[in-house]
Image (spheres, helix red, strand yellow):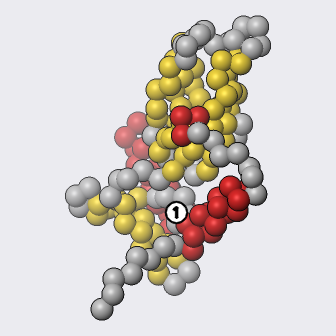
Amino acid sequence: MTARRLVSPGIACLALALAALTAAGAPAAAQEDVINVALDRALVVRIDRPADTVIVGNPMIADATVRDNRTLILTGRSFGTTNLIVLDKEGEPIANRLVTVSAADDNLVTVYSRPGRQTYSCTPVCEPTISIGDDPGTFSGRKDQISGRNELSSGDR
């Protein structure tokens, strides 16, 4: 019996698309030009010179919070790639970097049942959580439970 490694269709399509872009002569970004951040995680980014303006190409993918004029906090909001531009007081670029948001390696278990999908965080006991791509009914139900619990704990009854 031969062992096979299964690759999800999404990863296979992404790999083919990247190969096609490279084959078409599109310049690939150097590894140091990409800032990698995990979904729902924050990352401290230090800047060489004082920043005046910070722009995130798609704030649905990543968010930048200015801590001070040399420190940014990047937060992964959704899967994907966007860009981060930092300008100084004269409007000159300090940084222009790609930001890639990917899944965290959190011992997540994804359960597929017919058309639906549910996610569990197993660290070490499996508990339900929500993740982008989950079945809409499951996602909404869990989101409502989390929001309701947070309201109770904050005293906003």
In the picture as drawn, the residue positioned furthest to the bottom comes out as 1
Q: In terms of image quadrants, where is residue 153?
A: top left
Could you say where residue 57 lies in the image, as x and y percent from the top left? 71, 37
Percent coordinates x, y for residue 2 in the rendering: 33, 87
Q: Nearer the viewer, residue 147 or 27?
A: 27
Q: Amino acid at mark 1?
A: Phe
Say few, some or many: other residues with alpha carbon within 10 Å of mark 1 (under 14 / 14 to 19 / 20 or more).
Answer: some
When the figure is inspected, residue 143 is found, relative to residue 39, above or below; the finding is: below
Residue 114 against residue 124 in the figure, above or below? below
Q: Where is 118 relative to 28, above or below?
A: below
- Residue 12, image quadrant: bottom right
In the rendered view, does 58 fall on the left or right side of 70? right
Instruction: Provide the residue designation for mark 1.
Output: 139
* 109 relative position to 143: left or right: left
At 23% across and 61% down in the image, what residue appears?
Answer: 125
- 121 in relation to 61, above or below: below
Residue at disc 1, secondary structure: helix
Answer whether residue 70 is visible to the viewer in this image. Answer: yes
Residue at 65% from the left image edge and 58% from the top image edge: 18
- Location of the N terminus by quadrant is bottom left
Question: Residue drawn 55% across and 13% down?
Answer: 48
Quarter containing the C terminus: top left
The image shows residue 96 at horizontal and vertical percentages of 67, 28
Residue 21 placed where, x, y %?
71, 57
